[in-house]
Image (cartoon, helix red, strand yellow):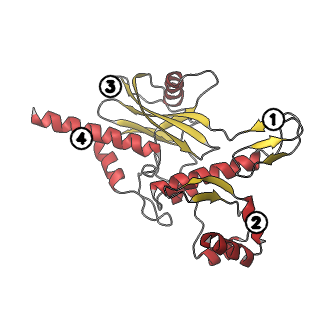
Amino acid sequence: MCLERDLKQILEKVGKDKHFINESFLLGCTDKSEPQFSLEVGEVERSALEQECRGTFVDLRKAFFMITPSESALAAKGQALLRWHQTNGFCSATGQPTTRNQSGSFRVCQSSGITYYPKMSPVVIVLVSDGSRCLLARQAMFPPGMYSALSGFCDMGESVEEALHREVAEEVGLEVENLQYSGSQHWPFPQSSFMLACHATVNPNKTQVNIDKAELEDARWFTLEEITTALQNPPRNPREQPPVFWVPPSYAIANQLIREWANQQQLLRSTHRLK
């Protein structure tokens, strides 16, 4: 109750009625059964809110380098849920306004009775290796110097395997062979994605990359030494100049793929030295 009281006081100081807090959405609960909410404050004067909260707003992608994994997951879910409510205010069948339930877990069209639930779009993300190097790429929208694993949306009717084969062939002109599932993750960009992460290998004699410039700005092979350096030297401060080459933050599942590959390569090298 103390936090709720403090928040109401802050909202009143920046010109919002204390009942504005009722527009928040329930995200879940902590291990101690403390409820967690997200609240859209875009219409509040930014400088005034920063002053009252004694902080500074930071782009969410950059914030992932500054906050813990649990905080990252909460922020990602909060942004995704807020964005979903912003874009689902009307029924696609009748054009009539939809209304939210109390917690914000769904919206209903009172005219048609249709219930709308938040959705995630399935996206495959794959780290391709030729046995001794891994392939990373960057889009023009990425921050300068950042490279990541290949990714793309699953087409209607596709399996994960089919989507991975197609995306790699389309974006870099390579034919993948073996696939290994790694894990999954919710990602709030571009419009709430469900990331399905895999490792894939290509024939070491067929590694010529043909970049689809409509999709990627660059793609190239990286050695274990380059990857290790990037993992050990992430951007520390989003306001400073980033390294020449860096990878996504530790919270991102792309980082997990890259670390898994690096660990596997180091294990293989250690095994060879013992022989």
- Name which of mark 2 and mark 1 comes first in the sequence: 2
- Name which of mark 1 and mark 4 comes first in the sequence: 1
Q: Nearer the viewer, mark 1 or mark 4?
A: 1
- Name which of mark 1 and mark 3 comes first in the sequence: 1
Q: Which residue is mark 4?
A: 266
- Residue 140 in the figure: left or right of residue 147: right
Of the residues shown, which amino acid type is indicated by label 2? Phe
* Screen quadrant of the N terminus: bottom right
- State the SS at label 3: loop
Query: From what the image shows, is residue 168 above or below residue 245?
Result: above
Q: Are marks 2 and 1 in contact (CB under 8 Å)?
A: no
- Name which of mark 3 and mark 2 comes first in the sequence: 2
- Residue 269 in the figure: left or right of residue 176: left
Q: Which residue is mark 1?
A: 114
Q: Which residue is mark 2?
A: 20
Comparing 240 with 19, the one in front is: 19
- State the SS at label 1: loop
Could you say where residue 267 lies in the image, as x and y percent from the top left? Answer: 22, 38
Could you say where residue 29 lies in the image, as x and y percent from the top left? Answer: 56, 54
* Screen quadrant of the C terminus: top left
Q: Which residue is mark 3?
A: 204
As measured in the structure, the alpha-carbon distance from the residue carrying label 3 to the one carrying label 2 is: 59 Å
Comparing 193 with 1, the one in front is: 1
Of the residues shown, which amino acid type is indicated by label 1? Ile
User: In percent of the image, x 22 and y 35: which residue is there?
Assistant: 268
As measured in the structure, the alpha-carbon distance from the residue carrying label 1 to the one carrying label 4 is: 54 Å
Please give the label number shown on residue 216: none
Say few, some or many: other residues with alpha carbon within 10 Å of mark 2 (under 14 / 14 to 19 / 20 or more): some
User: In percent of the image, x 51 and y 33: which residue is there?
Assistant: 211
Q: Nearer the viewer, mark 3 or mark 2?
A: 2
Query: From what the image shows, is residue 103 above or below residue 258?
Result: below
- State the SS at label 4: helix
